[in-house]
Image: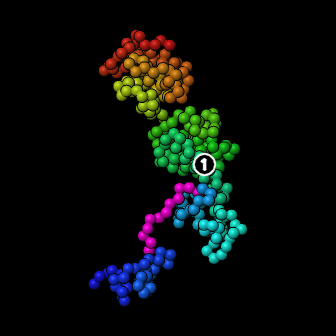
Amino acid sequence: MSNKICCKFHPEAALIEDYRAGDQICSACGLVVGDRVIDVGSEWRTFSSESGGEDKSRVGGTENSLLGSDLSTMIGPSPGGRGAGGSYSNMSSDAAIYTNRSRPQTSSTNDRALMDAFRTMSNMSDRINLPRTITDRANVLFKMVYEGRNLKGRSNSAIAAACLYIACRQDGVPRTFKEIVAVSAVSKKEIGRVFKLILKAHDTNVELITTGDFMSRFCGTLSLARPIQKAATCIAQRAVDLDIVPGRSPISVTAAAIYMASQASRDKRTQKEIADIAGVADVTIRQSYKLMLAKAKELFPADFDFVTPIENLPQC
């Protein structure tokens, strides 16, 4: 027996689908052949809430597990400002006809603060090309700090920037303070203070940064060849192992190693070019470079192809 749905009086007649009522109707006699038909058409999605545009979304946004559950209901007006049962000509086109506020919505103070911070960190992540996993980690950390109430008096913007900095380090893709400052509205000093307070108040652990954490990214941004990057990595690592640059930050050592390797190659880079990428001052690179230059013969890899001999490297 065939499972095909058809009119028992007119088996060959085409069926008309009434999507609003969910019925299948015989085109010959009007008999309702099937009811409760599921609309298998594609779901509309909306990417904009511009005023005057028709919102075709039939579902709400995804629920954020870090926020309170929102089970509220809002029924908006149909196009032209008319409701299902009458005229609402006195209402604005974007006014809601009915909103169920039987339980608190995400407009509470706490959720509003969290949403603002999440939005801020998401925008910062997009501007410096951070993956979603880091943003999610920063969101969880911010909520923990915010609910802990241990950083009262500190701005949420500073806490958000510090949380993003910590998330980068915890995920193994650290960013410099200058990179975070460039996409935030908070000073480097304030972010540094909040960073230390978070580590102390919440027993948060971060991995120590090393020269290798920044080398490939800095060399890639400077468009340096692979042999130069390899040499700079070797120079920086040996300088740290031999304790040639005590007290110097890994970022300044990385920048100085890149400068030394590039000056010994055909593809040279200036201190200013490297400083702009690394986010340190020219004098900082120069100071680390001077310490490393005296031991340059011990720092370069044995197979490096010198274009400029070590004795002819800039003396600064």
Provide the secondary structure element on which disc 1 rests.
helix
Picture quadrant of residue 121: top right
In this orientation, which residue lies closer to the viewer: 303 or 32?
Answer: 32
Which quarter of the picture shows residue 213? top left
Which residue sits at x=58%, y=35%? 182
Residue 286 is covered by the magenta coloring:
no
Q: How many marks?
A: 1
Q: Residue at x 60, y 68 (%)?
A: 78
Magenta stretch holds residue 39: yes
Which residue was labeled with disc 1? Answer: 117
What are the residue bounds of the magenta stretch? Answer: 38-49
Q: Can residue 164 be seen in this view?
A: no
The spot of residue 51 in percent (x, y) is 62, 57
Report the residue that reaches farthest toward the left.
1
Image quadrant where one finds the N terminus: bottom left
Q: Where is residue 27 in the image (x, y as percent from the top left)?
A: 42, 82
288 versus 47 height, above or below: above
* Picture residue at 65% right of the left edge, 75% below the top: 86
Relative side of 220 to 110, left or right: left
Q: Which amino acid does label 1 sit on?
A: Ala
Q: Which of 290 and 219 is in front in this view?
A: 219
Q: Where is residue 20 in the image (x, y as percent from the top left)?
A: 50, 75
Where residue 70 sits: x, y (%)? 59, 63
